[in-house]
Every structure is written in C-alpha cells, then in structure tokens.
Amino acid sequence: MAWTFTFSRKIKKNKPAVNKYDDTFFKHFLELTLNNVNRLKKQELSRKLGKRIVLLREKKGWSQAELARVCLKDRQSIERLERGTTNPTAYTLYEVASALEITLAELLKI
C-alpha cells in the first residue's frame, strides 16, 4: 500500500501525487517575463520623456535649477525627471508643461 502526500496537505491512499505547481510555475514565470518587458517599455518611455523635457528646457535657455524654481521643485527632482529614473504624476508633468509655457499634450509628444 503506497501513501502519497499531495500539495493540499491531505494524505490520500493509492493516488499519484499531482504537482499542481508545474502549470502555476510556468504561468508565474511567463507573467514575470511579460512584466519585465513592460517595465523596459516604461523605462524607455521615461527616458524619452526626460529627453523631451531637456530639449524644451534648453530651447528656453534654462538650467535645471531655473526650471525647478519656476515649478517650485528642487533641482534634483528635475534631474531625476530628465534622466527618466522617476515616475512622475500627471500633476507634476502639468507643472513642468506650465513652467515651459506649453500644453501637456505638447510635452507628451515623444
């Protein structure tokens, strides 16, 4: 008589153990892989947005400190925004667009 232990933590007689985690593991792995692809897209979008802000700021002849002063932000937050290492809120983007005297739609043309 063979005893098997299933993952539901119940002991059952003469039934082969079913590994329910094979499919679950694969689905989880696939989900993580897809999330990494999406994350790369987010990072790429952040970098493009940052480059756009640099371009528009330099068109006005402003330094990061000057843009930060007009936006009522610190220079480091503008630097992070331009490098694409932060996830700005819609309101932050609105503030930057207003400071650069453009619409939010113009700022987001990337």
Image (cartoon, grey):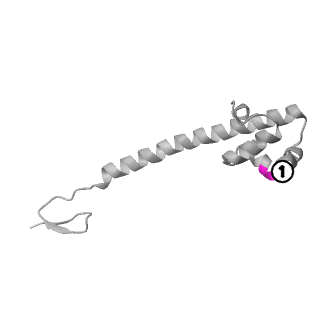
Magenta residues? 73-77
Residue 18 in percent (x, y) is at 22, 56
Residue nearer the viewer, 17 or 64:
64
Which residue was labeled with disc 1? 75
Left or right, residue 48 beside residue 38: right
Q: Seen from this angle, which residue lies furthest left?
A: 1
Residue at image coords 54%, 41%? 38
Secondary structure of the residue carrying numbered label 1: helix
> Residue 102, image x and y in percent?
78, 34
Residue that appears at 79% across and 40% down: 98
> Residue 51, position in %: x, y?
75, 35
**Quadrant including the N terminus:** bottom left
Query: Left or right: where does residue 57 sit relative to residue 91?
Result: right
* Quarter holding residue 21: bottom left
Is 71 on the left or on the right of 6, as rendered? right
Which secondary structure dominates the residues rendered in magenta? helix
Q: What's under tag 1, amino acid-wise?
A: Arg
Query: Where 60 sits versus 23, above or below?
Result: above
> Where is residue 32 shown, x and y percent of the image?
47, 47
At label 1, counting other C-alpha atoms closer than 10 Å, the crowd grade (few under 14, some 14-19, many 20 or more) is: some
